[in-house]
Image: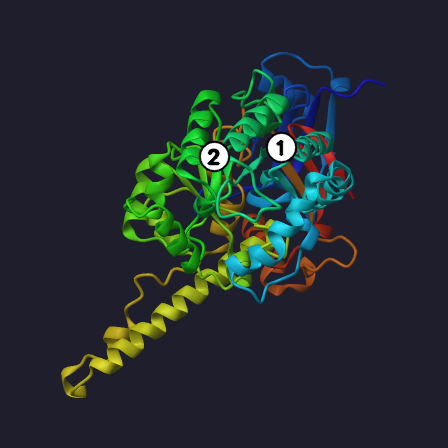
Amino acid sequence: MSQPTYLVFRGCIIDTPALGTLRVRANGALGVNQLSGRIIGVADQETATSADLVSMWIGQAVDSSKVETVELSADQFLMPGLIDTHTHAPQFTFLGLGHDLPLMDWLEKYTFRHESQFKDAALASSFYKTAIARVVRNGVTFAAYYGTIHVEANCILADTIRNAGQRAFVGKVCMDVNSPSYYSETTEESLQRTEEFIHTVMGDNAGDESALVRPIITPRFVPTCSAECLQGLGQLAQKYNLPVQSHLCENPDEVAFAKSCFPKQKSYSDIYHMAGLYGPRTIMAHCVHMDDDDIELVRQCGVGVSHCPNSNFSLSSGMADVRRFIEHGIPVGLGTDVGGGYAPSILDAMRMAAAANRALIATRRDARSKDTASKIVDATETKPSDAATDHTDAAPLNAAELLFLATQGGARVMGMHEQLGSLDQGKLFDALVIDLAVPNSPVPDAATTLAVHEHLDSSPVDAWKLRAEQFVFLADDRNITRVYVGGKLIHSL
């Protein structure tokens, strides 16, 4: 029996087309062409048959035998796939280790040693399959991966991702200075191997945005790359029309180290910029300790920020100010940064982003209170309400904003927002079916949650907004029952 050409999902459909906007179609319908992998239409309220809907959406009659209907239950909803804008595939080998160390010590003790082992292609073949399956199981439909310096292992990583059906950028890590002798390369080797990797993964179509797996230019970070290496990588990015990923302003010691390597550059950002590595298809991870020059250059060049709060907390790097990026018009998405971060889950990243945001608000509030108190000379000359009413940065990230960062925000950072990130007609169907009532679900039953239950009949949209909030803060991989990429089912429970 041939596979139906079209899928029609019927039930609750949730996405975030704009920051802070949670769009809920409580009784919606969404059609997918499985051949093109794209959404052919979306409707808010429909009683027509699925075949009639497909016929309307494509403008010609379609036989019902070519249409498969997926009826979502009362506890299920459809949403865009999660996007991980920064993770290290080989670092799954030491997940959960070294979180009592600062970044530079952690790199020396764990990272370089473990990554160097991937010179053994057999390790890559056996290990990456398990790691990628875990990422997919967590609902990540699109990820930006760092590999290692080894071409063969990186090609195995790319093949493994492609075979799993996940969408990805995959980068061969480049590091030609300030690196251990057992895990380093010359400048010439770094550039030659990068170009070899590009050709192996994509052949002559490196800039083809329709490809499931694509290479991404990947200088590890400034301290481990010479000026010649950075400039050469910038030239390769331009030659092959490729995206770029690296790390920026993660840790105070790293920032000082980077600036000492390039003392003539105005800022950390300027080092990447002078090498031709900045542009609207550049992803910079962390961005915790950004000065005004860094922020302005990132904004001017359209660089995207991968916010990795788990890693930033785990390695005591600091708290990135997401509101600051948003106010400057800088695209922001979420990253797990495995293994600096210990959880390969964008659900965890959303919660950690909320925690970092709230911790930053509280820290600044308390700092202002102490500053105000120290300036009080005479209580009669001071307005008691001044400190209490100063809430210019007191804007906690809400569930709708967190979902946006995890989906549409990530798509913007990856330069794919016109193709991914929301459930709109014409976009690629990278999506998840969420079930809040699976056995042993961490999400409470709607009937026992008064705030939800009282809206179920009178205002189902409001009820689903509350359930979406519970999904953000409570759900885990048990609730992700189906994962689709490009219209194809790649994981199901």
Compared to residue 427, the image places residue 181 above or below, namely below
Question: Which image quarter is the C terminus in?
Answer: top right
Label 1 Cα neighbours within 10 Å, binned few <14 / some 14-19 / many ≥20: many
| Residue at the farthest right position | 1
Report, in whole angstroms, how far the alpha carbon at label 2 lies from the one at label 1. 16 Å
Mark 2 and mark 1 in contact? Answer it, CB < 8 Å. Answer: no
Q: Residue type at mark 2: give it.
A: Val
User: At numbered mark 2, what does the secondary structure look like: helix, strand or loop?
Assistant: strand
- Front residue of 401 and 111: 111
Which residue carries the number 1 mark?
A: 167
| Residue at the farthest front position | 181
First reached walking from the N terminus: tag 2 or tag 1: 1
Q: Position of residue 153 (x, y in %)?
A: 68, 35
Residue at x-position 60% and y-position 27%? 197
Residue at x-position 61% and y-position 62%? 98
Which residue carries the number 2 mark?
A: 244
Compared to residue 376, the image places residue 255 above or below, namely above
Question: Which image quarter is the N terminus in?
Answer: top right
Q: Position of residue 237 (x, y in %)?
A: 46, 27
Label 2 Cα neighbours within 10 Å, binned few <14 / some 14-19 / many ≥20: many
Q: Residue type at mark 1: give it.
A: Arg
| Residue at the farthest top position | 60
Residue at x-position 69% and y-position 14%? 62
